[in-house]
Amino acid sequence: MAAVDIDVPVDTEAQIRTPEDLERQAEGYKEQGNVFYSQKDYSEAFNYYTKAIDASPKNASYYGNRAATLMMLCRFREALEDSQQAVRLDDCFMKGHLREGKCHLSLGNAMAASRCFQKVLELEPSNREAQQENKNAVALLEFERMADFGFEKRDFRKVVFCMDRALGVASACHRFKILKAECLALLGRYPEAQSVASDILRMDSTNADALYVRGLCLYYEDCIDKAVQFFVQALRMAPDHEKARLACRNAKALKAKKDEGNQAFKNNNYEAAYQLYTEALTIDPNNIKTNAKLYCNRATAGAKLNKVNQAIEDCTSAIKLDDTYIKAYLRRAQCYMNTEQYEEAVRDYEKVYQTEKTSDHKHLLKTAQLELKKSKRKDYYKVLGVGKNATDDEIKKAYRKRALMHHPDRHSAATPEVQKEEEKKFKEVGEAFTVLSDPKKKVRYDNGHDLDDDGCFDGRDFDANNIFRAFFGGGGGGGFSFDSSPDNGPGNFFFQFG
């Protein structure tokens, strides 16, 4: 059952003037505060302890009780003030020293906390709570030391680990929370970092450190304009905030250089764009997302400048920084296609299609797979030494040249090994001409179909000499041989008709 407020009527209360009367009234308020405290109704307990203090402002226990209530409400700074007032009124008030130490500890001030616990132990050497809390203070100092060392060495995971343990002891320490959030941002764990910073800003919208961390997260997520706004706001709150100043300067410089590069690219000034992206990459190595985009942009400019291998390297650098960056995979795959590295292109397109199953990505993958399949066949265009857009006349001229070059009769005086190799090449030249000179076969070949499907072409029954005779008109009893006479030169070919 809730206690009843024992306030006396106003007309009677106005008559209370003696210290004894005020003390009795204060005790009544305190008792009611105790009842609400035991019921975990800390807000009401706070109200009654406040009334007790107002009635008797020199009583240390009232401040001590209100401090305990404020601690339950997680209002540690106010609790610290009350506990400090309590021990000022009574230096032997052990609970006051204990609560002051706990407040210092919760707020992350381990040295001050330890001094308070030592005072308790002077008053009561066997106080186990003070002994344990003092050990917590010592542990907190060690976590701080390890975190400082880890930050110096850029071991941000270690710092987060230490701060998690430190916050287990100092739950209300904004400094520890900010350090953890900053390291989470530097590790790329932006949602976690933003959450910590936002929690602090809800309690204190002017906290420059929290504003800086919010800006840092946006900066590393390539939202540079918004990031600058937070850095500027942090500097308004704390003009000497060196980290915010440096981050703001880097953010502005990075955006300016990137924009310059983009404009140069739009103006088709690819050399200038390439150089500007290169300069931008030197501004802040820690900005992973922006640098990934810069590498990809430089790869695009490099491809325009026919720096294909460098473009591939830049795309790879972008992917190392951000392995979810689809545009970098697409750009690298196109470079692989341009350099006929089809297996690598297929691998990249497969990665893209697994991530984003669009019809365009499916088409790109199918095209790369087809080119890979085609690349594993004999390249009849290379065999004849012509381009893929060669005309019929160019194909015939190329066949004439290659067939004469590799005809077995021309190499009759060579070693058996050379004869065998030239005979193989002669056959390949005939195969190539058979396919590329026939419109139906050529279309099937160009489209990547197997030529022996539907009986279109069977290399096993192929006779290169028949093609040669048909091409050079050697049928109807005609013959041909190589003449080594001086007039024709060594190994020149001429036709001898019967």
Image (cartoon, rainbow, N blue to C red):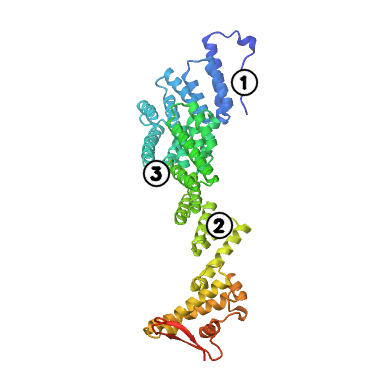
Question: Looking at the image, which residue sits at the far front?
Answer: 487
Q: Could you say which is closer to the camera, residue 288 or residue 120?
A: 288
- Name the spot of residue 350 as percent of width and height, x first: 55, 61
Residue behind mark 2: 352
Marks 3 and 2, how far apart in space? 33 Å
The answer to which of marks 1 and 2 sits earlier in the sequence is: 1
Residue type (three-letter) at the residue carrying disc 2: Val
Q: Are marks 1 and 2 in contact (CB under 8 Å)?
A: no
- CB under 8 Å between discs 3 and 2: no
Q: Circle 3 — which element?
A: loop
Residue 344 in view, yes or no:
yes
Give how far across and how far down residue 37 sits, in percent. 55, 28
Quarter of the image with the N terminus is top right
> Tag 1, which secondary structure?
loop
Where residue 87 sits in the image (x, y, percent)? 42, 21
Give the answer, above or below, for where 306 lies relative to 455: above
The amino acid type of the residue labelled 3 equals Asp
Q: Cα distance, mark 1 to mark 2?
A: 71 Å
Dot 3 corresponds to which residue?
A: 155
Give whichever of 320, 297 is nearer the camera: 297
Amino acid at dot 1: Asp
Quadrant of the image occupied by residue 107: top left
- Give residue 492's quadrant in the image: bottom left
The label shown at residue 167 is none
Q: Residues within 10 Å of mark 1 (few under 14, many from 20)?
A: few
- Residue at which label 1 appears: 5
- Mark 1 vs mark 3: which is more N-terminal? 1
Q: Nearer the viewer, mark 1 or mark 3?
A: 3
Q: Secondary structure at mark 2?
A: helix
